[in-house]
Amino acid sequence: MNALDTMRALANEGDVSSFGPGEIVFSSGDSGDCMYGVLDGTVQLSWNNGASQEVIKAGDVFGAGALVTADHRRYGEAKALTHCRILLMNREKFLFAVQESPMFAVELLGSIDERLRQLKDCLKG
């Protein structure tokens, strides 16, 4: 089972929100108690007043920083680019997913690593 399959299984029992193109998922400075998993669609993350951007696709997660930082604040904005279905995962749901499917954590780490490498390449260019 891959990360997207795990998120879809969790979505059967979990909190799923739909967003239309242009709708804001969260804004910089918002308080956060969950991370998000994209089930369908694409989301644009932006920070530094829009100077930096990244596109998140189905199977990727975003917003995890608010779960692990002391102030639980969002440092950027997330906006739906297309119609999106997004799974909201609080800390307990995330830990459950990792416990039930350890490969979920491995796949997410791989996804985050790939995104960081792409951002580094953009900064070099």
Image (cartoon, rainbow, N blue to C red):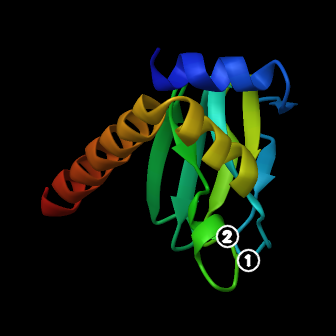
Q: Nearer the viewer, residue 112 or 102?
A: 102
Q: Is mark 1 in CB contact (under 8 Å) with mark 2?
A: yes
Q: Secondary structure at mark 2?
A: loop
Q: Residue at x 40, y 30 (%)?
A: 103
Q: From this viewpoint, is residue 81 visible? A: no
The circle on residue 29 is 1
Q: Crowding near pointer 2: few (<14 within 10 Å), some, many (20+)?
A: many
Q: Residue at x 61, y 56 (%)?
A: 63
Location of the C terminus by quadrant is bottom left
Q: Position of residue 19 (x, y in %)?
A: 82, 32
Q: Nearer the viewer, residue 93 or 71?
A: 93
Is residue 61 placed above or below 40 in the rendered structure? below
Q: Which residue is mark 2?
A: 74
Of the residues shown, which amino acid type is indicated by label 2? Answer: Arg
Q: Secondary structure at mark 1?
A: loop
Distance between the Cα atoms at labels 1 and 2?
5 Å
Q: Crowding near pointer 1: few (<14 within 10 Å), some, many (20+)?
A: few
Left or right: where does residue 9 sit relative to residue 118?
A: right
* Residue at far front of view: 99
Q: Position of residue 109 (x, y in %)?
A: 36, 45
Of the residues shown, which amino acid type is indicated by label 1? Answer: Gly
* Residue at far left of view: 124
